[in-house]
Amino acid sequence: MTSHLVDTHTHLWDKRFDHDREARMRSFDEEGIAWVLEVGVDLPTSRKSLILAESSPQVYAAVGVHPHDVKELDRDHLQLLKELARNGRCVAVGEIGLDFYRDLSPRPLQIKWFTEQLEWALSIQKPVILHVRQAYEEVLTILEGYPAFPAGGVVHCFQSDQRTAERFIALGFYVGIGGPITYSPKNNPELKQTLYEVVANLPLERILGETDCPYLTPNPVRGKRNEPAFVKYTVERIAAAVNRTPEETAIQLRRNAERLFLGKNG
């Protein structure tokens, strides 16, 4: 998979990378990583994501406010985010969405600021990175209320069923697959299908690979801090699900990511 790996969801700004962040970024070529997408969750981390993107041609940035953090969001903060998004290294708005699992922000506020950030992304024609947890139906209902999403987006760290994935795809979205595809099915007992089975029934052309580092470390390195190099384990599992080689899969996932975020055809 030489130089074809793309990690479409990283948080290298996290303090767990403070001691080796630059070293990890310098090792991208050696680890076969073409590029990564560094994702903010609030105004400070969106700024940090852009700083990292400006420091390396192999890093792009997304800016936005995570549903956990929208309780701190106001018009002034949103305006500052909009100014950050004008930077040429910013290729997406995110991560934004709804999280009804932890409810760290009141649900009405989550819905208000998700909708506002979604409309902002539509107005500047940038793809969105969606965070969805125990709120798939609510997010889809909001998305289906819009006529179209020309710039598209991705539902990050997807963990639901095939029908839900197909509804996102029908709206022009990609399905982001991370470390959970490598976990035991027993870790998701509420699902009628394992994530592996869902991926096996989706078109590879609508899938993206990601780590969500430093979180959700895949097997066989689970227990360690997650990092971009570990996306290879997720790619290998996706490849097995769709009956393709890891190399072929990595190439297609890179094409998908570059079509969505960099506007490349191929």
Image: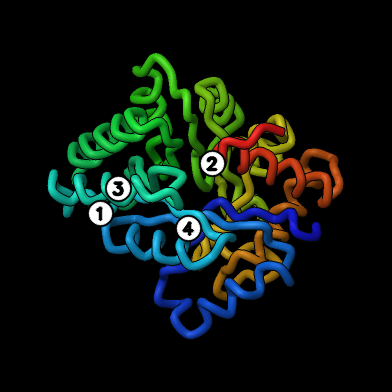
**Comes first in the chain, label 1 or label 4:** 4
**Comes first in the chain, label 3 or label 2:** 3
Local secondary structure at mark 2:
helix
Residue at x 57%, y 69% (from the top left corner): 226
Local secondary structure at mark 1:
helix
> How far separated are the C-alphas under marks 1 and 2?
24 Å
Mark 3 near mark 2, Cβ–Cβ under 8 Å? no
- State the image coordinates of residue 246 (x, y, percent, origin top left): 82, 51
- State the image coordinates of residue 258 (x, y, percent, origin top left): 62, 42
Location of residue 263 (image quadrant): top right
Q: Which residue is mark 2?
A: 261
Mark 1 near mark 2, Cβ–Cβ under 8 Å? no
Query: In the drawing, does residue 100 fall left or right of residue 187?
Result: left
Mark 3 near mark 1, Cβ–Cβ under 8 Å? yes
Residue 179 seen in this snapshot:
no
Local secondary structure at mark 3:
helix
Location of residue 219 (image quadrant): bottom right
Residue 122 seen in this snapshot:
yes
Q: Is residue 120 above or below residue 2?
A: above
Q: Residue furthest top?
A: 147
Residue at x 74%, y 72% (from the top left corner): 30
Q: Nearer the viewer, mark 3 or mark 2?
A: 2
> How far separated are the C-alphas under marks 4 and 3?
17 Å
Disc 1 marks a residue whose amino acid type is: Asp
Disc 2 marks a residue whose amino acid type is: Phe
Q: Which residue is mark 3?
A: 67
